[in-house]
Amino acid sequence: IDAKLGSSLTPIFVVHLEYARDRLNEAYQSGLMQVTAATGGEAVFCRTTSEISTAIEAMFRKIIAHYGVDLEVTGKKGENLEVSLQSPTGPLQYRNRIHLKN
């Protein structure tokens, strides 16, 4: 997943409205978490209907607060790079691996 989505510049954000505990759905939900993490986004799973509006509101706040950083890199095409960012105001949520397109 990291190799395929690592060169994508757009983060994916997911609010899943109905959490399920069976093995097939747990695998599906785990896949959603991997996809969103690989792009620097996030997945939230609602366990009850009362959590839905709060989860959607929180996700829109994150999307609205999203910003981009342009990096100039000197790696080879096809290479995976690890990125580290710091802020004096606190921790940042970002993708830490980038795959340079061929």
Image (cartoon, rainbow, N blue to C red):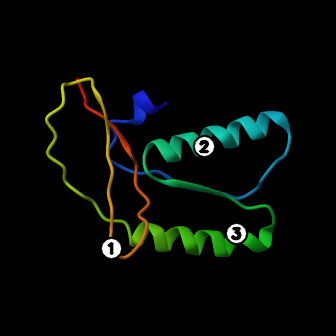
Q: Which mark is residue 32?
A: 2
* Drawn side of residue 99 relative to residue 53, left or right: left
Vertical arrangement, residue 43 with respect to residue 4, above or below:
below
* Drawn side of residue 101 relative to residue 62, left or right: left
Amino acid type for the residue under numbered disc 3: Ile
Residue occupying image coordinates x 24% and y 58%: 69
Element marked by disc 2: helix
Indicate which disc, 3 or 2, sits on the residue closer to the N terminus. Answer: 2
Indicate which disc, 1 or 3, sits on the residue closer to the N terminus. Answer: 3
Cα separation, mark 2 vs mark 1, equals 31 Å
Cα separation, mark 1 vs mark 3, equals 33 Å
Quarter of the rendering occupied by the C terminus: top left
Q: Position of residue 53 (x, y in %)?
A: 66, 74
Q: Position of residue 62 (x, y in %)?
A: 47, 69
Q: Which mark is residue 88?
A: 1
Residue occupying image coordinates x 37% and y 36%: 6
Indicate which disc, 2 or 1, sits on the residue closer to the N terminus. Answer: 2
Find residue 87 and report its image quarter. bottom left
Amino acid type for the residue under numbered disc 2: Leu
